[in-house]
Each structure stands twice: as structure tokens, then as C-alpha cells.
Image (tube, rainbow, N blue to C red):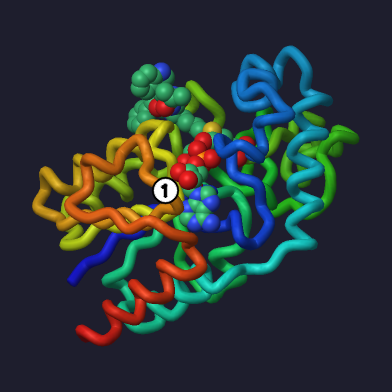
Amino acid sequence: MRVVVLTGAGISAESGVPTFRDADGLWEGHRVEDVATPEAYDAAPMVVHQFYDARRAALDGVEPNPAHVALGRLEAALGDDLFLVTQNIDDLHERGGSTRVLHMHGELRSALCRACGARTEWAGPMGDFPPCPGCGVTELRPDVVWFGEIPYEMDTIVAELQRADLFVSIGTSGAVYPAAGFVQYAARHGARTLELNLVESEGTSFFHESRNGPAGTLVPAWVDEVLAQL
Ligand code: BJW
């Protein structure tokens, strides 16, 4: 059985990473268009850097929760039959035990050079405009996918959705495309679809089954179900 799991901000909420669109979400204090578009970055790079530098620094203070750990267990059992794609830019899946994670919206701990295109592992701030370790030009930006940009590795994701037997979406509002369209695409190609989310999402009606509750409870329970069937 080939399983594709898509995760969103909700899976990291119980670790203390704010979501985007909930009442206490990350963007309550920041207008989306102020920080999450290339145009906003061009207009005020320092504001955008401060936003991402703070989120990068905050990663040191959070830990994976039982949902991340359960997906690590699932990978250990399914191996290559699990494809985990996340919209999240944190590293909690990796720290929870997942070794193969596709970060379709980029990663906080990575820098993208606007001059040479190199992607470099990055732990510190970028707001002091450091040089690219590759080409030396001071054009590093957060290696994240903003509105109007194309998410990473769409060809790989589409291929995995086409051959999935089960598509599971965890902790995402279904408000942002292309990820919001994965459920319909996978279902059209024959997959059964399951949503695990705190509450009903914008996409709930597209799923064969939807379970509501915190990811830290729902995901370990679902993983146990899958492992019991192996
Ligand atoms: C819990 C929980 C708990 C809470 N347990 N659950 C008009 C129509 C259709 C599309 C478009 C349109 N106009 C423009 C577009 C395209 C646009 C788009 O979708 N816009 C929408 C606003 C309409 N998309 C793009 O521009 C994308 N690119 C693109 O389409 O390129 C074209 C192309 C695609 C493919 C092939 C070829 C060409 C790029 C989108 C980039 C999104 N970037 C961001 C920022 C990344 C960097 C950063 O982190 O700052 O990605 S936006 C932000 O939203 C972030 C997230 O990954 C993304 C999704 O958010 P997510 O994860 O769903 O979080 P929330 O907060 O929305 O939801 C959390 C959920 O968890 C909620 O449901 C809670 O209930 C739940 N929850 N606690 C379980 N404990």
C-alpha cells in the first residue's frame, strides 16, 4: 500500500509553532502580503528578514510532538511506500524521526541566493545581509515559497499522488494551492482520502473520511491502525 501524507501548520501547533490562519495564528500580527510575497520582500527586505529570523530562532525552543514522532514510526514500518510532503518550513518532522521529507514550501533553516541560486543550510539570522557562501554576493533570502512562486518538486509530488493508494492530509486548512488540490487529484487517480484536522477545513467535503481532533492524538491513533493492518 502506497501512502502519501501531506502536512500543514496544524501538525506543529501542539509543539508551540503558531499556525497561519487560526485566531492566534502567526499572521494575526503580520499581514500576509507584508511578508509572504516576493514583492513584499523587494519593498522591505529588512521587515521580512526580521520575521523569518525570529521564526528560525524560535525553532530552538520547540520540540516534535507525538504526531511528528508517529509519522517517524510510520516511515520506519513502510519505508519507500510512505511519501511525506509538508508545507511546513520547520524541521520538526526530521527531529521526530522522519528521514525523507519533501518541504514543498521550503525550509526555515535554508538560505536561497538570489544571485547564484544556491540553497545553503542556514542556522543564524539573515537580516544582517551576510554573503552567500557560494558566490559571495549579499543577496540571500529565506528559502521559502511565497505567493506567486512555484513550490518545490511539483513533478515528484504529482507522480506520488498518481500512484497513491491512500492520501492523508494532516493539519492544513485547504486554503492554499496547489496543496489544497492534492486531495481531489489523488482521489481522481484512485486513492482513498483521509483528513485529520482539529476542525472541519475548507477541503473537508473532498475527503472520503474526515476525523476532527488534535493531531497529537489523532495521528498516533491512525498510525497504530495502519501498523496493525501490516
Ligand atoms: C490543527 C491543530 C492541531 C490547528 N491538530 N490540526 C485563486 C484561486 C486559487 C489559487 C490561487 C488564486 N490566487 C492565487 C492562487 C495561488 C496561490 C494561492 O493558493 N492563493 C490562495 C490564498 C488562494 N498559491 C500560490 O501562489 C502558490 N504557488 C502557485 O500556485 O504556483 C503556481 C504553480 C503551482 C504548481 C505548479 C505550477 C505552478 C505558492 C503558495 C506559497 C504559500 N506560502 C506560504 C508561506 C511559506 C513560508 C512561511 O511559512 O512563511 O506557506 S503561505 C502559508 O500557507 C504557508 C503554509 O504552508 C500555507 C498553508 O497553510 P496551512 O499549513 O494550511 O496552515 P493554516 O494556518 O492555514 O491551517 C492550519 C490548520 O491546522 C487549520 O485547519 C487548523 O484547524 C488546523 N489545526 N491546530 C490538528 N492541534
The answer to whether 19 appears left or right of 216 in the picture is right
Q: Disc 1 residue type? A: Val
Task: Specify whether residue 209 is in view.
Answer: yes
The answer to whether 104 appears left or right of 46 in the picture is left
Q: Name the residue under label 1.
A: 199
Q: Which percent across, then down, holds residue 164?
A: 19, 59
Identify the residue shown where x is 72% and y is 63%.
Answer: 62
The answer to whether 137 appears left or right of 7 in the picture is right
Q: Which percent across, then down, holds residue 34?
A: 69, 20
Tag 1's secondary structure? Answer: loop
Up/down of 13 relative to 130, above or below: below
Choose top left, top right, bottom left or bottom right for residue 45: top right
Residue behind label 1 places its C-beta within 8 angstroms of ligand 1: yes
Q: Which percent across, then down, holds residue 61?
A: 79, 62
Along the line of sight, which residue is nearer the eye, 30 or 114? 30
The answer to whether 60 appears left or right of 40 in the picture is right
Choose top left, top right, bottom left or bottom right for residue 144: top right
Identify the residue shown where x is 32% and y is 48%.
Answer: 157
Up/down of 218 relative to 13, above or below: below
Task: Specify whether residue 86 is in view.
Answer: no
Identify the residue shown where x is 77% and y is 35%.
Answer: 51
User: In the rendered view of the protein, which quadrant contains the C terminus?
Assistant: bottom left
Q: Which percent across, then down, holds residue 87?
A: 48, 46
Up/down of 171 relative to 132, above or below: below
Along the line of sight, which residue is nearer the eye, 102 or 130? 102
